[in-house]
Image (cartoon, helix red, strand yellow):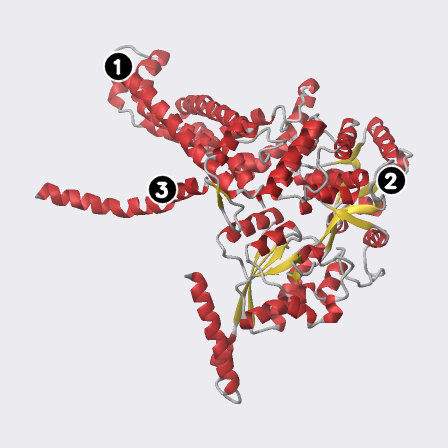
Amino acid sequence: MKALSSRKFILMGLLPATLIYALFVFVPVIWSSYYGFFDWSGIGEAHYIGFDNYVEIFRDPIFWTALNNNIIFVLASVFGQIPIALIVAILVQKDGRLTRFLRTAVFMPMVLSTVVIGMIWQYIYHPQIGILNFLLQALGLESWQRVWLSEDYGIFSLIPPLIWSFVGLYLIIFIAALQNIPGEIHDAANLDGATGARKLWSVTLPMIKGTIIVAVVLCISGSLKSFDLVYIMTRGGPAHATELLATYMYNSTFSSYRYGFGSAISTTIVLISLVLIGISQWIMSLKSKSKT
Amino acid sequence: MRRWTKTAAGLLLSSMVVVSACGGNGGNNEGGTAGDKVKLTVWHNWTGQDGKAIAMRGLLEQFEADHPNIELETEGLPTDGLKTRLRTVAAANEMPDLFVMWPDVMTKEFVGGDLIQPINDYLDSKPEWRDNFIENALDGYTVDDNIYSVPMNLAPTSFIYYNQAIFDEHNVSVPQTWDELLAAVETFKEGGVIPIALGNKANWFVQSTIFSTIGDRITGSDWFLKAASQDGASFTDPQFVEALEKLQELGEAGAFQQGFNSIDENQMVQLYFQGKAAMFISGGWAMANVVSNAPEDILSQTHVALLPAIEGGAGDPASTAGVVGTGMGISSKLEGARKDAAMELLYALAGPEGQQATLDSATLVSYNIPLDESKASPLFVELYNLMQDTKISPVYDSKLSSAAVEVTNNSLQELLNGGDPQTIAQRIQDAQAAAVKRQ
């Protein structure tokens, strides 16, 4: 009896959140996948065309460029943001004036709007008056000067601002996790004579493993959704060279005005995300099984 | 739901007007004035600090001051943002009451969706206004003999803005032919000056300001209109491929500074303002920016010219690509007092006074009014006089479908980076053919 009523209470408590989630996330996803079967310009009649939009997506070379770029983004985020954040977190976890300053400095980009970050980096990369090319010249490295946001280098030039803007988030997460390791464990490690690198590998990192996994998942899903930075800095150009899945969807919907086609792309993005998250879950479950 | 409440509110308002008008003399005025207020939502793109934006915002304020019974709820958005927002609300059938709207493709699509209403009756009630527009000015707003708006300006899209001092220093005269242009590019390059500043990050820029004119010079307008409607001409025709090759030739000659695909129009004009570039190519809209923001020494040396003639081309060399400018669309949901108020606002913005204010702010208009040369900037007088003997040819993005425009814009970026003209022509053809078939 008591169990039942508490279960009822839990259900009732969950209801508002579930309703809001269903209304603003689930329903639009279904709705949009429904539109994916239509040829619709957003105005006037929509024509049902079955799977034609999907066939077109998979035949469209721009889709494959976008997917490829998106995978570059995911890899760069996972192998860029997380190690850097972790190293910095370990270095600055102790309280002190300098470390506090460093923490704030690394966290700074998180409080800047993406538009500001995009503008800053656009001027850093500016081909004529950019700081980067100017610095290279001052150092006598003229041969290294590039048109950074061009067809050839654009997608790689977008990686530093991407990493720079999100490192702060993971830094904070890692610092919190590091500070949550009980002091007794450190004391025990010290008694056993584990110090320095040994303590880091055998004690500290295993203790925050859960946090690292969460950070990786956040990182994958975050970088799959990347849109704003790229849209501000290159708009997916030049000539689709820096197109991501999200900008491809946006440009198809709001530049070409093909709402049906754009909806089909959104649905494809959802499916790709589900597959990637499924794979990462599977890999992690394999790992935890092999441990036990 | 919202629609219902709006109509109900509208009906209520108009009935109150009738009631208060009937019992009008000496009645309770206080309650009446508050209830009589007609509210209109207005979306525009006059957000900048250039002369035209300031003038148009001034007209809106003036209108509100002159009409205490009309309340305007205005919202300014940058041009690209406004276009996107309009499409989004169009999909949801929730247009604002009045909004800045583009001729040709956008007007046709909105008419097709039954989103805007014709203004024929109002226009006919003011014949002296209707008949004073320049030839063909209303074509872009006319669908099946119904006129849906009138242009508030004129937007020729390609002029060369050049710095006379730099030209003199390098002994170059304004290029009249394609070969002279290529020679000038060579000279400036050797002299360490950027020949033509270009900012094509928003990828419509090359298409609208350079390629539409080069294309017209070579293919002629007739061919282009046929190809756009896929009626007897195709974008794979040799003349179109030649036009693509010409643009590529200009790019390969080093006419534009490095990285032109990664900077935007403002940064492009900055390069020119800093004296680093001898020319830039842009539309009539750049004038308001040059006149109000260029450093004094640059402004005094700046002149405008048409793009050079191209030998053997089918087009008229005394022409520039262009469109009649934006107009105000009026939502099809407006009726009664609110419709009347909307028409009045249209007249305030696009009527003789509005056109005069636009012209005074260094923006060309599609309306026959003389320019007061003593008041205007000398550079604008030059542009105004240049336009008197210049014809307007179609801009690509006003005639092609949205999907084909997007393909063209991206392909031109690729073309300038060494893409194959033949392949690109085929791609544009495919996109336009598919869009025409869908219609």
Chain letter for mark 2 = B
The residue identified by callout 3 is: A26
Q: Tell which tag, 1 or 2, sits nearer the viewer.
A: 1
Instruction: Look at the picture and state if B104 lies above or below B420.
Output: below
Residue B185 is drawn in which quadrant?
top right
Q: Amino acid at mark 2?
A: Ala
Chain letter for mark 3 = A
Q: For this rendering, which residue is in front, B309 or B400?
A: B400
B428 relative position to B75: left or right: right
Q: Amino acid at mark 1?
A: Lys
Q: For this rendering, which residue is in front, B103 or A231?
A: B103
Residues at marks 1 and 3, CA–CA distance in whole angstroms: 36 Å
Measuring from the top left, give residue A289's x and y in whole percent.
26, 17
> Tags 3 and 2 in contact by the CB under 8 Å rule?
no
Instruction: Look at the picture and state if B52 lies above or below A165.
Output: below
A116 relative position to B396: left or right: left
Q: Is residue B420 visible?
A: yes
Measuring from the top left, give residue B34's x and y in whole percent.
49, 75
Are the residues under marks 3 and 2 on the same chain? no
- Give the residue displayed 64% in from the left and 49% down from the top: B105
- Label 3 Cα neighbours within 10 Å, binned few <14 / some 14-19 / many ≥20: few
The residue identified by callout 1 is: A291
The residue identified by callout 2 is: B165
Q: Tell which tag, 3 or 2, sits nearer the viewer.
A: 3
- Label 2 Cα neighbours within 10 Å, binned few <14 / some 14-19 / many ≥20: some
Residue B235 is drawn in which quadrant?
top right
- Give the residue displayed 79% in from the left and 62% down from the top: B368
